[in-house]
């Protein structure tokens, strides 16, 4: 599922997500639990302010590109 993500950009663009939107609902990232890289993508397991866990994927080397919600786990 494609999602809109707002990121912190330090020494590189889209360094880490700080908030994301599912429909009209905004979720703030409380903690990044894990981060890893795949071919053409970076993944972030985050804990949001609703206390649930989400895996967000930033696909930059494949089509379609952009941010996607890959997984969800209720706390």
Image (cartoon, helix red, strand yellow):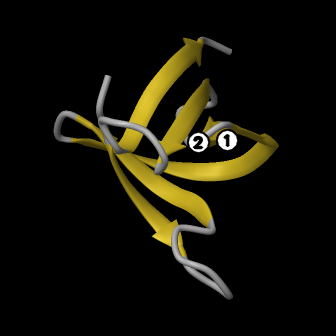
Farthest-out residue, top:
74
Q: In the picture provided, is 22 more to the left or to the right than 75?
A: left
The residue under the point 66% across, 51% down is: 30
Q: Is residue 53 above or below residue 21?
A: above
Q: In the picture provided, is 53 more to the left or to the right than 37?
A: left
The residue under the point 53% across, 76% down is: 13
Is disc 1 surrounded by few (<14), some (14 to 19) or many (20+) residues within 10 Å?
Answer: many
Q: Is residue 35 visible in the rendered structure shown here?
A: yes
> Which residue position holds label 1?
44
For the image shown, how many numbered marks are present on the structure? 2
Between residues 31 and 14, which one lies in front from this camera angle?
A: 14
Between residues 26 and 62, which one lies in front from this camera angle?
A: 62
The quadrant holding residue 34 is top right
Q: Is residue 45 visible in the rendered structure shown here?
A: no
Q: In the picture provided, is 54 more to the left or to the right than 27?
A: right
Image quarter of the C terminus: top right
Residue 52, given in percent of the width and then of the height, sits at 61, 24
Between residues 23 and 63, which one lies in front from this camera angle?
A: 63
At mark 2, the secondary structure is strand
Between the residue at mark 2 and the residue at mark 1, the CA separation in whole angstroms equals 10 Å
Q: In the picture provided, is 10 more to the left or to the right than 27?
A: right
> Which residue position holds label 2?
41
Residue 50, given in percent of the width and then of the height, sits at 53, 33
The residue under the point 63% across, 30% down is: 51
């Amino acid at each position: 599922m494609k999602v809109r993500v707002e990121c912190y950009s330090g020494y590189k663009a889209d360094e880490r997500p700080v908030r994301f939107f599912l429909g009209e609902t905004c979720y703030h990232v409380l903690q990044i639990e894990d981060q890893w890289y795949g071919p053409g993508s970076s993944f972030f397991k985050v804990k949001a302010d609703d206390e649930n866990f989400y895996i967000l994927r930033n696909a930059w080397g494949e089509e379609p590109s952009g941010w996607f919600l890959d997984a969800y786990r209720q706390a």
